[in-house]
Image (cartoon, rainbow, N blue to C red):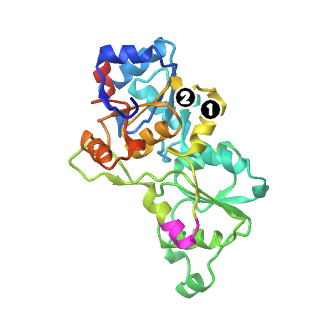
């Protein structure tokens, strides 16, 4: 029964895997917390790889490129994971831009950091706006009444950006006044987990995306989970059978919804953002699209 939220143990996990060819894993809160592997996760991933299961890592975190994620995987013990097994918003953004002929010989205004820059560089997409941009660079009158814009910009990409401020918001909103200017957002994650669960979780990309779309009075084309842009990319690249695919994540509103919306089996791990209390709330609210089929405390509990 979909949404049953049955607890898995090693025996039930082995039984489930008989009907699974592909396992899609989220990263933050599932494989690692900041720079530490979640205990048991590397061993489980390597065991699946030895069994011949297809493993795909799909993260909404836009702070790192696939090359950087591969290096992190190798360091933390995920030896079987290579960059071509990883899907992140950066590569989706770059592919989406390249597929839009309106952007021929035009630039991207980028609200984002290194991960997005690396993927745009890799795909030969020109961009401006990265890094810090402060009022000190302009006179107040000049900026408020004549926002300095690059006429070659044909798209705005919004991801996580620790330099985000009013200057960047103004520029993005004014570029997006042109209805032909493409508006892409890497994801709408609200928070992301860290290793200290007693500390408030970090504010994520959704706050920045919301600011831009309110100012621009436009909705973005969204990458990442749970949106179909991600699923369509995965389906086209690996030809997965959703009925024989398991989506594993720590967030009901991104990972589990992604799996439910696209016909996959789903499993929640409790090592990241969402808890069984959250699942109980979603059940009481009859939000079936947020309810996982299975759950485990962490991946290591399935060994």
Position of residue 60 in the picture relative to residue 179 (left or right): left
Mark carried by residue 235? 1
Which quarter of the picture shows residue 108?
bottom right
Q: Is residue 133 visible?
A: no
Q: Position of residue 83 (x, y in %)?
A: 56, 30
Position of residue 163 in the picture relative to residue 273 (left or right): right
Check disc 2 and report the residue beneath it: 242
Q: Position of residue 30 (x, y in %)?
A: 37, 34
Residue farthest bottom in this picture: 141
Q: Closer to the camera, 94 or 230? A: 230
Q: Closer to the camera, 242 or 116? A: 242
Q: Position of residue 69 (x, y in %)?
A: 49, 35
Q: Please name the residue shown 62% across and 48% down the image.
A: 93
Q: Secondary structure at mark 2?
A: helix
Q: Is residue 164 magenta?
A: no
Q: Closer to the camera, 131 or 82? A: 82
Residues packed near mark 1 inside 10 Å, few (<14), some (14 to 19) or many (20 plus):
few
Mark carried by residue 294? none
**Stretch in magenta:** 211-218
Residue farthest left in this picture: 198
Q: Earlier in the sequence, mark 2 or mark 1?
A: 1
The number of numbered badges drawn on the structure is 2
Q: Please name the residue shown 38% across and 47% down the image.
A: 287
Q: Closer to the camera, 292 or 50? A: 292
Look at the picture and state if 45 lies above or below 255: above
Q: Is residue 4 visible?
A: yes
In contact (CB < 8 Å): disc 2 and disc 1 = yes
Q: Position of residue 4 (x, y in %)?
A: 34, 32
Q: Main secondary structure of the magenta part?
A: helix
Residue farthest top in this picture: 51
Look at the picture and state if 184 lies above or below 179: above
Q: Secondary structure at mark 1?
A: helix
């Amino acid at each position: 029964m979909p949404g049953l939220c049955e607890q898995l143990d090693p025996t039930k996990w082995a039984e489930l895997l008989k009907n699974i060819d592909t396992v899609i894993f989220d990263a933050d809160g599932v494989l690692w917390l900041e720079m530490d592997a979640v205990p048991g996760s590397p061993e489980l991933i390597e065991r699946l790889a030895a069994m011949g299961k297809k493993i795909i890592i799909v993260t909404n975190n836009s702070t790192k490129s696939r090359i950087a994620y591969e290096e992190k995987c190798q360091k933390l013990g995920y030896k079987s994971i290579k960059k071509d097994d990883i899907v992140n918003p950066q590569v989706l953004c770059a592919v989406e831009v390249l597929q839009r002929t309106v952007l021929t010989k035009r630039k991207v205004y980028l609200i984002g950091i290194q991960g997005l820059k690396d993927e745009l560089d890799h795909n030969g997409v020109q961009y401006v706006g990265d890094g810090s941009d402060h009022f000190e660079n302009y006179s107040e009158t000049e900026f408020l009444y004549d926002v300095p814009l690059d006429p070659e910009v044909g798209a705005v990409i919004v991801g996580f950006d620790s330099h985000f401020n009013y200057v960047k918001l103004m520029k993005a909103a004014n570029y997006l006044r042109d209805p032909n200017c493409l508006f892409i957002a890497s994801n709408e994650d609200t928070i992301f987990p860290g290793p200290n669960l007693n500390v408030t979780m970090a504010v994520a990309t959704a706050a920045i995306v919301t600011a831009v779309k309110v100012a621009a009075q436009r909705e973005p084309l969204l990458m990442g989970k749970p949106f179909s842009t991600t699923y369509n990319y995965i389906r086209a690249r690996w030809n997965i059978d959703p009925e024989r695919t398991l989506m594993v994540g720590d967030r009901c509103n991104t990972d589990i919804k992604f799996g439910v919306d696209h016909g996959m089996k789903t499993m929640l791990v409790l090592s990241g953002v969402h808890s069984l209390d959250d699942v109980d709330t979603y059940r009481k609210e009859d939000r079936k699209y947020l309810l996982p089929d299975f759950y485990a405390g962490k991946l290591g509990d399935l060994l």
